[in-house]
């Protein structure tokens, strides 16, 4: 493994909604993987890190539209992020193994991700929870004037 690759893995972050049980369950499957190439992945609950959500919003990335994977200087969101994560995960039996196996295929991820996001939004609405609040440096500058 090259030094550049090692640095990219050290800088890898997965930003997700910690109040979403679907997001939590998926992140937990990554922890369960013994042969996961994403082992150095830093998993971050977006609700606990508003400054990171603000940084994403400044880059026009809305965390409410999908899970975000940051690898080095590259940002991946939604289906694309899940495809990358699934390709790095070891497949085992059961539902987790099936999910990782299915999400390895980009086209299938693109089809499945809107369903997963809709389930998240429905759960948040039914449980009385709100979406993650977005602020940007631009918005705060405008409000202060």
Image (tube, grey):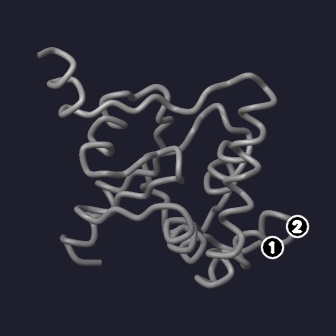
The quadrant the C terminus occupies is: top left
Mark 2, Cα crowd under 10 Å, few <14 / some 14-19 / many 20+, is: few
Percent across and percent down for residue 116 are: 72, 57
Residue drawn at (67%, 63%) of the image: 114
The quadrant the N terminus occupies is: bottom left
Dot 2 corresponds to which residue? Answer: 94
Please tell me the numbered disc located at residue 98. Answer: 1
User: Which element type, helix, strand or loop, lies under badge 2?
Assistant: helix
Furthest residue toward top: 144
Mark 1, Cα crowd under 10 Å, few <14 / some 14-19 / many 20+, is: few
Residue drawn at (66%, 65%) of the image: 113
Instruction: Tell me whether the residue at label 2 lies in contact with that at label 1, contact meaning CB atoms closer than 8 angstroms.
Output: yes
- Relative placement, left or right, of 13 versus 51 is right
Name the quadrant containing residue 74. Answer: bottom left
Percent across and percent down for residue 55 are: 26, 40
- Relative placement, left or right, of 134 versus 16 is left
Name the quadrant containing residue 71. Answer: bottom left
Placement of 116 over or under 83, stated as above or below: above
User: Which element type, helix, strand or loop, lies under badge 1?
Assistant: helix
Residue 7 in sight from this viewpoint: no
């Amino acid at each position: 493994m090259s030094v550049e690759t090692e640095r990219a893995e050290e800088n890898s972050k997965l930003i997700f909604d910690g109040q979403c049980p679907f997001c939590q369950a998926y992140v937990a499957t990554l922890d369960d993987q013994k042969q996961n190439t994403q082992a150095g992945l830093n998993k971050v609950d977006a609700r606990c890190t508003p400054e990171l959500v603000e940084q994403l919003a400044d880059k026009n990335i809305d965390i409410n539209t999908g899970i975000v994977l940051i690898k080095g200087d590259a940002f991946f969101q939604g289906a694309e992020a899940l495809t990358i994560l699934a390709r790095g995960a070891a497949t085992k039996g059961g539902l987790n193994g099936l999910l990782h196996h299915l999400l390895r295929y980009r086209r299938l991820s693109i089809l499945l991700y809107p369903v997963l996001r809709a389930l998240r939004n429905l759960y948040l609405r039914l449980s009385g929870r709100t979406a993650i609040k977005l602020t940007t440096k631009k918005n705060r500058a405008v409000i202060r004037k």
